[in-house]
Image (tube, rainbow, N blue to C red):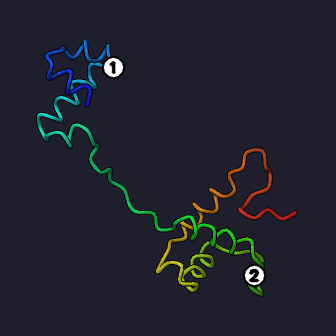
Amino acid sequence: MQILLRADAGETDSEIAEELGVSPGTVANVRRRFAAGGLDAALFDKPRPGAVPVLDGKAEAIVIATACSPVPEGRATWTARMLANRLVQLQVVESVSEDTILRVLKKASSSRGRRSRGACPRA
């Protein structure tokens, strides 16, 4: 807002940049966005692209808790497919990919300095 007010008062881009501690390019960009789209365009970023996360924090906690729970009879460990199917079974999500499950588990096990692997290290 200060950039636009100072520009309206007749200050140059270099003067505004020096006074406000920003680069002259920033001043020019704000002025350009204002000229093209008005005040809202100058003050607020456009929404950024990207998919909505499939799993929220609660769902991620369920994945980790399930991975740390006893494995089904006849199995040695939980697989990503089994965990994904279990989340659907529990009606946490309609569907989830194995890659998403693996990302959650990787994120949970990324403690630096710990040598054991997996979200639920066995003692």
**Quarter of the C terminus within the rendering:** bottom right
Residue 36 vertical position relative to residue 31 in the rendered view, above or below? below
Q: CA distance from mark 2 to mark 1?
A: 63 Å
Residue appearing at x 47%, y 68% in the figure: 54
Query: Considering the numbered disc 1 on the image, is that residue within a helix, a strand or a loop?
Result: helix
Q: Horizontal placement of 52 versus 10: left or right?
A: right
Residue appearing at x 61%, y 81% in the figure: 86
Residue 9 vertical position relative to residue 55 in the rendered view, above or below? above
Residue appearing at x 68%, y 51% in the figure: 110
| Camera-side mark, 2 or 1 | 1
Residue 76 vertical position relative to residue 26 in the rendered view, above or below? below
Q: Which residue is mark 2?
A: 75
Residue 75 vertical position relative to residue 22 in the rendered view, above or below? below
Q: How many dots with numbers?
A: 2
Name the disc covering residue 20, or none.
1
Q: Nearer the viewer, residue 24 or 76?
A: 24
